[in-house]
Image (cartoon, rainbow, N blue to C red):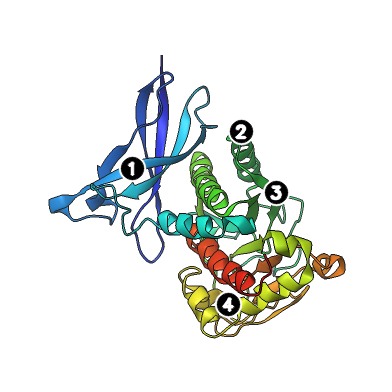
Amino acid sequence: MSYRAEYIWIDGTRPSAKLRSKTKILADGAEPPIWGFDGSSTNQAEGHASDCVLKPVFSCPDPIRGGSDTLVLCEVLNTDFSPHESNTRSLLTEVAERFEDQQPIFGIEQEYTFFDGARPLGFPDRGYPAPQGGYYCGVGSDEIFGRKIVERHLDHCLAAGLGISGINAEVMPGQWEFQVGPLSPVDVADQLWVARWLLYRTAEDFGVSATLDPKPVKGDWNGAGAHTNFSTKAMREGYDAIITACEALGEGTKPLEHVSDYGAGIDTRLTGLHETAPFDQYSYGVSNRGASVRIPWQVEADQKGYIEDRRPNANVDPYVVTRRIVDTCCAALEKAGQV
């Protein structure tokens, strides 16, 4: 007997990388080996030296094909087995290992928008639907579009064993969200990439596309983000560490350094409107969805918990956002002796 292994990787497309995948047939019981691909077709190599290497780093059951078939997430390496320049996972693993003793964990809220052709799912052929108001967490065919796809995607994520923790309809018609975590930095990023692949693949079966565009419709419509919830052991045990982390994210040039790595087109979404802070201003506050970083009300009440960085775009690279936050916050907590 044989099984199908779907090798998934992140390409070199800029400013936002794309997911690629292809199938390898393996003998029953065989572990997915290192494989390769043509990097000249994925913006990762020149034609005269086009070979790139796929190194499996995470696998799970393939819920679409079923049986013993498997999804295999891979890192991209050069042919000398050094990390390819597009391989942001390798940079995260170094930082995650350095601060492993602080036990950082993440929950990422992935917003996305379904499109039917050139228009968001649920938008009329001409003009616009009713203004925002009833769509968020709504119910009914007059306000909710794409639920069958969303439920199928949720089923697939659960069958794959991913750490998905919830779904909800978002503020604009055809806009939805799923959450992955709480998980370690590397695990949450790996599983979010696989969940994204499953989203695209599931929508494909319905003749619909899914986009992570941070501002899919211009004008008075909410953008799409990837709100990133974060804590360390010290933050889960005391409020002083919460404040230290918030202050560290706003120190010196950190705000702009982070925002520059939080997804292409971030200035179109972080405008100060639609539950966002301006991209070039940093703020934090309790229960404030207009701040860069929100401290949930129950965290202040409990004097411990987590923070939510509301700045990352829907199209953010989860390997990059987790690395940035761990590097900044854990270094500050270490310096303050709050570990």
Q: Tell which circle, 2 or 4, labels the residue nearer the N-terminal end.
A: 2
* Nearer to me, 55 or 289: 55
Q: Which residue is mark 3?
A: 166
Instruction: Please tell me whether mark 3 sits on a helix, a strand or a loop.
Output: strand
Pointers 2 and 4 in contact (C-beta within 8 Å): no
Q: Which residue is mark 2?
A: 159
Foreground mark, 1 or 2? 1
Q: How many numbered marks have been drawn onto this rendered protein structure? A: 4
Label 2 neighbourhood size at 10 Å, few (<14), some (14-19), many (20+)?
some
Residue positioned most to the left: 48
Tell me the number on the disc at residue 270: 4
Q: CA distance from mark 2 to mark 4?
A: 35 Å
Say which quadrant the N terminus sits in: top left
Q: Tell which circle, 3 or 1, labels the residue nearer the N-terminal end.
A: 1
Q: Which residue is mark 1?
A: 54
Q: Residue 35: where, in percent of width, then height?
A: 30, 37
Q: CA distance from mark 3 to mark 4?
A: 25 Å
Q: Position of 257 compared to 50: left or right?
A: right
Q: Is residue 312 visible?
A: no
Foreground mark, 4 or 1? 1
Q: CA distance from mark 1 to mark 2?
A: 25 Å
At x 28%, y 57%, the residue is 43
Residue positioned most to the right: 301
Q: CA distance from mark 3 to mark 1?
A: 31 Å
Residue type for callout 4 = Leu
